Amino acid sequence: MTHLFEPFEIGALALANRIIVAPMCQYSADEGSAGDWHLIHLGHLALSGASMLIIEATAVSAEGRITAADLGLYSDANEAALARVLAAVRAHSPIAIGMQLAHAGRKASSRAPWQGGAQVPIGQPGGWPTVAPSAVPHAPGEQPPVGLDAAGMQKIRDDFARAATRAARLGIDGVEIHAAHGYLLHQFLSPIANQRDDAYGGSIENRMRFPLEIFDVVRAAFPPDRPVWARISATDWLPGGWDIDGTVALSRALKARGCAAIHVSSGGVSPQQKIQLGPGYQVPFAARVKAEVGLPTIAVGLITEPEQAEAIVAGGEADAVSLARAMLYDPRWPWHAAAALGARVVAPHQYWRSQPRQYKDLFENASFGAR
Ligand SMILES: Cc1cc2nc3c(=O)[nH]c(=O)nc-3n(C[C@H](O)[C@H](O)[C@H](O)COP(=O)(O)O)c2cc1C
């Protein structure tokens, strides 16, 4: 028995194995609404054999989108469009479906990566005023965001709660709160972006306050028998920035509030970051969170090989792994991992005949005949 293919639980959500499809923005929505691209994209990833598919960063408001083409869940039209996609996916795959709820803060109003990813100036198509904890731009020379006041923060709490209610109606199995990658909640956590001098800035307790309030409103709006967890950047990769000690403190505070897991990523708050890239480069952060907090922990980042993923879980560094780029490159990665590790995986019956001769027991319950 491999460890990677052992069942696993996030709160009450039972997962068939420890391979998760990481959230991946597609910048392909229309006014926040999913379309045929999402049906194709999520549909094929749902056949991957992973235990859970986390839907991309899904904006809780129009102004919280990274680009004008981001997926959103802030209107009835957005909800109806996702319902159509989810019905198709669910009809053909048992995969658990998570959703990442997000607000981009000062990194909103951007172009898609394939258009260069730069800020879109206010007034140009796809450009709008952004908000953040403080009126500090992400990069020098960019138009600064508006520092949030009490009413602006209340709107964001309400937007997260409403989106969580919509996610619940859609039958989403679990919500991941995006508190990583330099987006709004990470901006509150990091002293680089948060220069407030009120109850939401300064000490780590103050900087954690708004992200924790968002956790509370999402947790309250989502059914208690379905998990809510957070994705955190473990470090800003910059002196004086958010760091792993803060990440452990935040994870403990989240755990006390009923958070079901921590998804450990890093970086994104400043273009000055100096990331030390390499295979599994964020796994040591996940290992510290798992050891010191004790919540189910998901490791991510340059995990590309089945043996590498198996070692991370078997060695107790994380409870599960999530993959992004490797999963796009090879959407049957979990099948190939199961084959390499001698495990079994669920595959759609339409594809059972593809089982290679040397892996006679790869697909669960597979059988076929002909006359
Ligand atoms: C196309 C693409 C879109 C992404 N969009 C998101 C996103 O919506 N939310 C998020 O938290 N991370 C996002 N990421 C980051 C991934 O989830 C992941 O953390 C990162 O790519 C490192 O994992 P990998 O080495 O397996 O790709 C994205 C990455 C890619 C490649």
Image: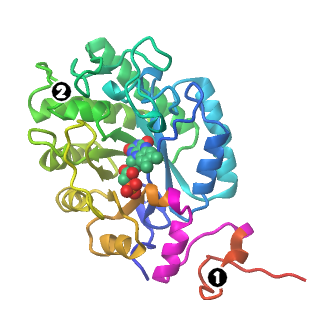
Percent coordinates x, y for residue 84 in the rendering: 68, 39
Residue 22 shown left or right of residue 94 in the figure: left
Q: Amino acid at mark 1?
A: Pro
Could you say whether the residue bearing mark 2 is in a helix, strand or loop? loop
Q: Amino acid at mark 2?
A: Asn
Indicate which label's residue lies in the foreground, 1 or 2. Answer: 1
In this rendering, is residue 6 above or below 140? below
Which region is colored magenta?
328-350
Residue 286 shown left or right of residue 96 in the figure: left
In this rendering, is residue 299 above or below 220? below
Q: CA distance from mark 1 to mark 2?
A: 54 Å
On the question of residue 343 being in view, the answer is no
Query: Which corner quadrant of the image does residue 319 belong to?
Result: bottom left
Q: Quadrant where the N terminus lies? A: bottom left
Percent coordinates x, y for residue 346 in the rendering: 60, 70
The numbered mark, 1 or 2, whose residue comes first in the sequence reads 2
Query: Which corner quadrant of the image does residue 368 belong to?
Result: bottom right
Percent coordinates x, y for residue 107 in the rendering: 34, 28
